[in-house]
Image (cartoon, grey):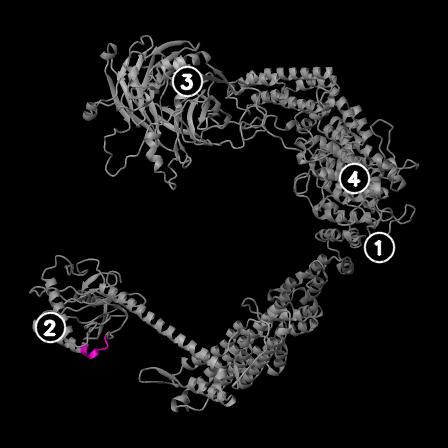
């Protein structure tokens, strides 16, 4: 089911059953060759007339690409890394009409020019990319890793019974899926107990007995009613007993719970008022036991336990086998055990009741704890099983409350055995429900498959809301045999339902039934927690009642949305209506009682057969056999062998009956059964027979039935995937006989070939099979049969060679109309190469499996003999049948078969030999020599084949493939073959130098560009082993061939570094490597001679332009590191590309990282870089000019370029650095005027332009330029001001400057301010009318303008414009006041007056007055400036006040912390051990301290100015003050770094106060007690002090000053000085103001 809950395993040792779904085998993605041919794919000859070779290539490409589709994702059909293509890939490239050799043409057959082999000719080969034959591995079409997977064309392996909930044919029981068919059986077969219902639920029954309220089931069916009566029925639905009438029971209210004892003889009933009665069924006239509720007196005295009055007894249960022991629970959350004593009659027995759960209503909760509302949601005592267990005597009872699961043992005493809290998985705010059910220990017929025990464990299933848990109870034997065993409770499985669970019952030991709050019945398997069935019971109208909401309403009403442990609703109780007994379900409804039983496996199979679904029946029976379905639910055992014996016979019977039924029905009416049903039946029967391992049924009954009906094709097609995956390999001959014509008739020769290659050849009719394979071109199958069945490796090779004879004899391509022109003909011809590759490397063709060692050696020897014996062969031996390569000639050439193969396709044959060379068979191994020495015991072909080695093979190839008989397109591959194999097998191959040199020359003269890389690689292989004596003569050949890697190797070995670098420039594939080459060559470690360095430099000069074009940045770094003198030459060579020059110079002059790129650059390079930067990055020029040394730059060279490109700011900076400040300012003012004119023209012409947005952007850009160059002017003025001030500082000290004359820097400021003001005035006059402001005045006249459309945002431009003058004045004020000591004079109020600023301002106003009779036009500008200054002043004052406040708070906190001082570690001196401070110190210390404090306070009042630090100095730098006060304790504890400095500005008053204290000490006669402060030995010398501890003078004790060190050790000063005197002089003593240095003797 799509939304079925998933179980979660709790215990580690829990076993999980197999999945419900049948195993779905993978589908094959490959298609067959014949399929592709039959699908109507257009033939290459349909639309365009192609040559025979082209048609062959295209057709064969399509054939092999079909098999390639089954390859793995990495592109290789054998799932291993492939090398750059495949030999067959090259063959199957789309041919074109261009010849393989550039500039050549296709020669006609009659031409005297040698033609290449057929595989190398245009249209057959692969012109580009190169064939690369020696980097490939041959593969067969059928050799694929996916060969063992079933085919998608047959659904036989699809899941016949894939489902998750029901055991039907994919029947899902989720009602949300209406399209799912219902099973033809009832999952639960319900039976209404009509007779019982007629007596209990009829109107007369309800009137006499009341309505049923609860149900109990054992040997009888027991109902409790609303009138306090118990009805007992037998299983024949006879009313056997009516219990209660005429007794006190009917006066106790409705029956709310019933229970039956283990021996079925005693029935207990609980009533709504709290009374409990038990009845002996043999004497039911009066109660066997009466357990009344507590009366008022008993409640008050509390001498006995029991249910309180008017509570509902919700649960009852008997304990063990006893009739007089039971447990009960009520809706108030209390539970009791009741044990009756022995006696006569009900009155003679006394019942002892013990509370086992809950609190009485009038009992106060413990202090500090709130009493939570509670009830007993579920309750149950452990029933008895069929085996005696220790738990039977304990009276185990499980109780489920809203918060806990509690399991108690009631005998011999009540004792809690287990507690478990509610799981966290319980859904938040869901319905509050609870239920539980025990299952006792039972003896098993078959040992448990998980535990191996013959007895099952006691189990408890309990549910909170939607979470179900299974608890195992283990008995652990006690060490003392007299003691009972201990119990261990372990939660084993947990399952989460979609909705709350209201009732749960054990249907059997392994099957659970669950009833949900929506009255949906779910069947679960215990171990796997798999939901096997689910269906609705809403139509049953199950009886339910609200028992718990009254008690728990506070819990629901106080629902907290954030508390996920709370519930949103309390569900009704269903537990009294849902019972299970001996595999049957009993439901108590509002109007009836129903009995239900799960249908078993046999019933379900019969139901399917009766419904006509024979396929579904076979699938279901198969799933029962394999155990993939819900075997426990349908009554099948878990033991596999037992289940197989039960199901197999039934399964075979169903299949036989189905076949008979189907074909008998079809015989009467052939249209009655559709072909799809026959196909489905065949597939289903195959799966079933495979499951039961009964293949005989497939070929006997099943095949016979299909054959008799004439529909054996369905059987054969269904059999196909089983043959391919190896499940069935032994096929009877009669089946093969029918298979061949069937597949051939449908055009499935390729699929048939694949099937034959997977069959056991011992079952094949060889004559028929080989004839068929030849007839239909099934050469893979033909080779397989000859090799595997007869161990004959020559015959299939002869069959393939016979295809080449007419082709090679005529030396031309066959036309498409010839027999040789069809696809199968050519596909077979090309199979010769993979066959040789497989056989000569010891593999089975085409499957790729390894041949047995002896068979592989025989095959290799025979094939080598056949190819290299040098003559035509008569085969089979003893026959006169001989294959002639030239039938029309009287004599065969030498090595005829080898020549024919080479003429057909030399590259591919050499590729196959390349693989064969890797096999150890060609080694001169002792084993091979031994076999050769025993030649008289071996046939001729074996003896000859064992003597063949690599040297012999190559010699024969060189003899045959001479230039007189083979074209260069073929001989090049022999040269490659030799070059590749010589380095790999130098001990087995020996060649003369001339032969190898000839091979090198041949490689250099490769016939086509597509072979260039392969030829060079082969030449590299050869040169790794062979060193030609005349290598210098080969260099021109290497150059013409483009073998640059070889040339680099030669030049590097010969240390011809100039030529090496030149080769990198010439190599089109590795030009970037020239930079690394130059680095390696010119680094000092290489040790080049001067001549070699000059050669490299010469090459660099010749190729400098190309070097820069490759990468100007890398070129610059390389040249700068190794040849900086070539910079100018390189730049000159790239004169036509200034962009590259700029990138080159930028790398040198502005490297990204601080790299050392040689000596400082020349002035010419910097100037050239600046000129280029003006073109390519003008915004960066000013920044760069500010960084370089301007003394080295020539203004006359740079200024024209700067002015031409508009980089005025850089020009100004450069002129200023040269000392031309006035000229720089003049140039700047001129440019500002140019910008002003441009802006005026733009605004004036705005009305006539249509691009309004562009005008606004242009105006803003001009304003930004004005601001930018104004800032440049400010920078110029500020720099000049600083320079003049520094130069004239001495002269200004000697003579006060004039307050009227302007200095040179002030004149600069004046020019800048005046220019800014005039620009602002003139532009404001134009912009104000546009912004709506009052018209401006120029020379006293109102400037009037015609109305201009709002093309510009005048207000925004005005704001930017006024900032010009404001920024200038602000900069002036800042520059003239930062270091204005000479020009600022302190007034009376301490406010400075900036004469420089005033002089500039006065000069500005004077000039303005002279140039303009009315200053009104500057009013707006000046007002805005001074308003800004006023605003800035108020902000500054506010900031100062805030800063002073913060500073005061910080200082206050620092003072408070300093006064706290240090706390010593102990109260005794570390040296003498006497107590010196703290509690217990002798003498009136506190009194003396108070007296001293009062005396000091009086002195402070007498002083006019308070003194902050009386007589206290700060000890700094690891030093302590000298003498201190006499009697008092220090009232200020400081932390500082001063060194004998006064803390008060009133130094004289401090000294007077100190002298006064000295006089008092003399008159009082007290000992001098000094305030001592010591410091740490830390690096900053911070000093920390602590007040001394003082005490009155004693005759025998003199207290001196105390010293507290930074390590918090405390000493008498005298003791510390005595210790330091022994260690050496550590300081000096002195009077006031002197300092002592101390160091702790302990910590140093």
Real-space CA distance between mark 3 and mark 1, rounded to the nearest whole angstrom = 95 Å
Residue beneath label 3, please?
A: 442
Q: Secondary structure at mark 2?
A: helix
Viewer-side residue, 871 vs 1170: 1170
- Give the Cα distance between marks 4 and 2: 125 Å
Proximity of marks 3 and 4: CB atoms separated by less than 8 Å:
no
Displayed quadrant of residue 1345: bottom right
Q: Is residue 1547 magenta?
A: yes
Query: Quick one: 417 or 406, which is closer to the camera?
Result: 406
Q: Which residue is mark 2?
A: 1561
Residue on which the image places disc 4:
60
Relative to 1040, say whether 1135 is above or below: below
SS at mark 3 in the image:
loop
Q: Residue 948: which quarter of the image?
A: top right
Q: Secondary structure at mark 1?
A: loop
Image check: 836 left or right of 156?
A: right
- What is the magenta range? 1544-1549
Callout 1: 10 Å neighbours few (<14), some, many (20+)? few
Disc 1 or 4, which lies upstream in sequence?
4
Query: How many angstroms separate mark 3 from mark 4 (CA)?
Result: 72 Å
Percent position of residue 561, x then y = 39, 41
Q: Which mark is residue 103?
A: 1
Mark-to-mark CA distance, 1 and 2: 126 Å
């Amino acid at each position: 089911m799509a939304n079925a809950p998933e179980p979660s395993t709790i215990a580690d040792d829990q076993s999980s059953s197999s999945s419900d779904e049948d195993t779905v085998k993978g589908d094959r993605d490959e298609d067959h060759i014949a399929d592709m041919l039959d699908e109507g794919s257009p033939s290459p000859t349909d639309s365009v007339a192609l040559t025979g070779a082209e048609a062959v290539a295209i057709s064969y490409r399509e054939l092999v690409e079909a098999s390639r589709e089954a390859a793995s994702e990495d592109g290789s059909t054998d799932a291993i890394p492939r090398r750059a293509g495949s030999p067959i890939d090259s063959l199957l490239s789309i041919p074109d009409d261009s010849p393989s050799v550039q500039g050549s043409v296709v020669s006609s057959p009659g031409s005297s020019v040698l033609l290449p082999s057929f595989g190398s000719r245009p249209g057959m080969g692969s012109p580009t990319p190169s064939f690369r034959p020696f980097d490939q591995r041959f593969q067969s079409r059928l050799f694929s890793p996916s060969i063992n997977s079933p085919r998608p064309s047959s659904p036989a392996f699809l899941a016949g019974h894939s489902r998750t909930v029901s055991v039907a044919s994919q029947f899902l029981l989720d009602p949300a899926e209406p399209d799912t068919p219902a099973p033809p059986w009832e999952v639960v077969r319900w039976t209404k107990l009509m007779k019982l219902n007629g007596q209990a639920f009829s109107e007369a029954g309800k009137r006499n007995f009341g309505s049923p309220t609860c149900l109990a089931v054992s040997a009888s069916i027991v109902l409790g009613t609303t009138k306090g009566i118990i009805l007992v029925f037998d299983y024949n639905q006879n009313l056997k007993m009516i219990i209660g009438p005429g007794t006190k029971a009917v006066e106790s209210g409705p029956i709310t719970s019933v229970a039956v004892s283990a021996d079925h003889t005693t029935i207990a009933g609980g009533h709504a008022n709290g009374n409990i009665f038990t009845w002996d069924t043999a004497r039911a006239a009066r109660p066997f036991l009466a357990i009344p509720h507590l009366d008022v007196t008993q409640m008050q005295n509390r001498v006995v336990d029991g249910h309180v009055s008017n509570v509902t007894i919700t649960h009852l249960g008997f304990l063990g086998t006893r009739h007089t022991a039971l447990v009960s629970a009520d809706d108030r959350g209390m539970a009791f055990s009741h044990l009756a004593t022995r006696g006569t009659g009900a009155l003679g027995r006394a019942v002892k009741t013990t509370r086992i759960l809950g609190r009485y209503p009038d009992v106060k909760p413990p202090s500090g704890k709130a009493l939570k509302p509670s009830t007993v949601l579920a309750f149950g005592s452990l029933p008895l099983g069929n085996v005696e267990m220790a738990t039977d005597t304990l009276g185990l009872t499980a109780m489920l409350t809203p918060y806990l699961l509690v399991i108690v043992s009631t005998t011999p005493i009540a004792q809690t055995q287990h507690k478990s809290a509610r799981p966290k998985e319980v859904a938040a705010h869901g319905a509050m429900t609870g239920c539980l059910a025990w299952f006792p220990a039972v003896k098993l017929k078959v040992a448990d498959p998980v535990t191996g025990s013959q007895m099952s464990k006691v189990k408890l299933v309990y549910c909170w809301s939607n979470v179900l848990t299974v608890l195992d109870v283990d008995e652990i034997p006690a060490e003392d045999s007299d003691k009972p065993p201990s119990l261990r409770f372990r939660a084993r499985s947990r399952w989460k339902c979609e909705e709350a669970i209201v009732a749960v019952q054990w249907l059997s030991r392994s099957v659970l039934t669950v009833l949900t709050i929506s009255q949906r019945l779910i069947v679960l398997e215990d171990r796997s927690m798999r939901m096997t069935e689910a269906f609705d019971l809403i139509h049953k109208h199950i009886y339910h009642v609200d028992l718990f909401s009254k008690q728990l309403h506070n819990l629901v009403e106080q629902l907290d949305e954030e508390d996920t442990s709370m519930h949103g609703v309390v569900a009704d109780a269903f537990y009294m209506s849902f019972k299970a007994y001996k595999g049957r379900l009993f439901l108590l409804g509002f109007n009836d009682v129903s009995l239900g039983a799960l249908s078993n496996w046999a019933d379900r199979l019969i139901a399917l057969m009766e419904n006509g679904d024979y396929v579904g029946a076979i699938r279901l029976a198969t799933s029962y056999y394999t155990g993939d379905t819900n075997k426990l639910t349908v009554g099948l055992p878990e033991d596999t062998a037992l289940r197989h014996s039960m199901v197999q016979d039934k399964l075979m019977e169903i299949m036989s009956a189905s076949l008979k039924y189907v074909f008998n029905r079809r015989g009467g009416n052939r249209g009655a059964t559709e072909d799809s049903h026959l196909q489905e039946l065949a597939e289903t029967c195959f799966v079933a027979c495979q499951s039961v391992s009964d293949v005989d049924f497939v070929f006997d009954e099943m095949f016979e039935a299909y054959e008799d009906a004439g529909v054996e094709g369905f059987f054969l097609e269904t059999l196909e995937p089983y043959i391919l995956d190896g499940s069935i390999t032994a096929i009877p001959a009669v089946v093969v006989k029918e298979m061949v014509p069937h597949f051939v008739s449908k055009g499935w020769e390729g699929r048939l070939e694949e099937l034959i290659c997977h069959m056991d050849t011992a079952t094949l009719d060889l004559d028929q099979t080989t004839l068929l394979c030849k007839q239909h071109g099934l050469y893979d199958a033909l080779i397989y049969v000859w090799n595997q069945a007869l161990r004959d490796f020559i015959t299939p090779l002869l069959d393939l060679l016979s295809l080449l004879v007419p082709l090679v004899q005529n030396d031309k391509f066959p036309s498409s109309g010839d027999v040789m022109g069809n696809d199968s003909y050519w596909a077979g011809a090309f199979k010769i190469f993979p066959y040789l590759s497989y056989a000569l490397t010891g593999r089975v063709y085409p499957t790729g499996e390894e041949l047995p060692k002896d068979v592989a050696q025989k095959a290799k020897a025979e094939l080598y003999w056949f190819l290299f014996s040098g003559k035509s062969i008569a085969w089979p031996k003893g026959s006169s049948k001989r294959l002639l390569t030239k039938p029309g000639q009287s004599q065969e050439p030498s090595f005829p078969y080898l020549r024919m193969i080479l003429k057909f396709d030399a590259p591919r044959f050499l590729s196959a030999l390349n693989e064969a060379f890797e096999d150890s068979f060609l080694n001169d191994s002792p084993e091979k020599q031994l076999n050769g020495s025993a030649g008289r015991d071996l046939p001729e072909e074996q003896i000859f084949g064992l003597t063949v080695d690599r040297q012999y093979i190559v010699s024969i190839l060189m003899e045959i493939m001479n230039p007189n008989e083979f074209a260069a397109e073929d001989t090049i591959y022999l040269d490659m073959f030799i070059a590749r194999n010589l380095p790999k097998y130098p001990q087995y191959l020996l060649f003369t130098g001339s032969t190898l040199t000839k091979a090198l020359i041949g490689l250099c003269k490769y016939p086509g560009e597509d072979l260039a890389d392969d030829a060079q690689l082969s030449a590299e292989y050869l040169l790794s082993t062979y060193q030609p004596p005349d290598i210098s003569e080969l260099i021109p050949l290497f150059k013409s061939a483009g073998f640059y890697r070889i040339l680099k190797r030669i030049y590097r070995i010969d240390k011809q570094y100039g030529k090496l670098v030149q080769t990198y420039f010439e190599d089109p594939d590795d030009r970037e490597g020239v930079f690394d080459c130059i680095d390696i060559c010119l680094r000092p470690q290489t040790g080049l001679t001067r001549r070699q360095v000059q050669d490299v430099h010469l090459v660099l000069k010749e190729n400098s332009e190309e070097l820069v074009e490759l990468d100007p940045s890398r070129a610059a770094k390389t040249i700068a590191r190794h040849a900086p003198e070539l910079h100018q030459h390189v730049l000159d060579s790239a004169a036509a590309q200034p962009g590259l020059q700029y990138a080159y110079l930028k790398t040198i002059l502005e490297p990204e990282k601080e790299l050392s790129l040689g000596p400082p650059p020349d002035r010419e390079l910097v100037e050239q870089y600046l000129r280029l930067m003006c073109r390519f990055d003008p915004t960066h020029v000013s920044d760069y000019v500010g960084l370089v040394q301007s003394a080295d730059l020539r203004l006359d060279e740079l200024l024209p370029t700067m002015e031409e490109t508009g980089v005025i700011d850089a020009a100004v900076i450069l002129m200023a650095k040269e000392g031309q400040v006035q000229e720089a300012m003049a140039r700047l003012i001129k440019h500002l005027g140019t910008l002003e004119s441009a802006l005026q023209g733009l605004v004036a012409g705005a009305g006539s332009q249509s691009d309004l947005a562009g005008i606004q952007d242009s105006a803003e850009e001009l304003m930004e330029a004005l601001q930018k160059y104004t800032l440049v002017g400010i920078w110029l003025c500020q720099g000049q001001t600083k320079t003049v001030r520094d130069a004239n500082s001495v002269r200004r000290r000697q003579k006060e400057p004039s307050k009227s004359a302007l200095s040179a820097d002030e004149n600069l400021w004046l020019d800048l301010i005046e220019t800014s003001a005039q620009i602002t005035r003139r532009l404001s006059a134009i912009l104000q009318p546009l912004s709506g402001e009052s018209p401006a005045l120029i020379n006293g006249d109102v400037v009037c303008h015609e109305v201009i459309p709002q093309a510009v945002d005048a207000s925004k431009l005005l704001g930017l414009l006024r900032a010009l003058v404001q920024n200038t004045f602000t900069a002036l004020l800042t520059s003239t006041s930062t270091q204005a000591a000479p020009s600022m004079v302190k007034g009376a109020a301490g406010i400075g007056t900036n004469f420089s600023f005033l002089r500039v301002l006065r000069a500005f106003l004077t000039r303005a007055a002279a140039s303009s009779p009315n200053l009104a036009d500057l009013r707006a500008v000046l007002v805005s400036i001074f308003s800004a200054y006023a605003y800035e002043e108020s902000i500054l004052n506010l900031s100062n006040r805030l800063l002073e406040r913060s500073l005061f708070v910080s200082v206050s906190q620092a003072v408070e912390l300093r006064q706290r001082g240090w706390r010593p570690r102990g109260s005794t001196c570390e040296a003498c051990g006497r107590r010196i401070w703290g509690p217990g110190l002798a003498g009136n210390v506190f009194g003396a301290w108070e007296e001293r404090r009062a005396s000091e306070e009086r002195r402070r009042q007498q002083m006019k100015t308070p003194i902050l630090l009386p007589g206290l100095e700060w000890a700094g730098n690891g030093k302590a003050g000298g003498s201190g006060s006499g009697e008092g304790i220090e009232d200020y504890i400081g932390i500082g770094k001063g060194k004998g400095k006064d803390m008060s500005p009133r130094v004289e008053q401090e000294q007077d106060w100190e002298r006064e204290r000295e006089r008092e000490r003399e008159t009082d006669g007290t000992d001098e007690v000094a305030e001592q402060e010591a410091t740490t030995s830390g690096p900053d010398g911070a000093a920390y002090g602590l007040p001394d501890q003082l005490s009155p003078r004693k005759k025998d004790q003199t207290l001196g000053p105390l010293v507290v060190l930074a390590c918090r050790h405390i000493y008498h000063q005298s003791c510390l000085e005595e210790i330091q005197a022994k260690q050496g002089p550590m300081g000096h003593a002195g009077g006031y103001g002197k300092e002592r240095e101390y160091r702790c003797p302990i910590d140093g």
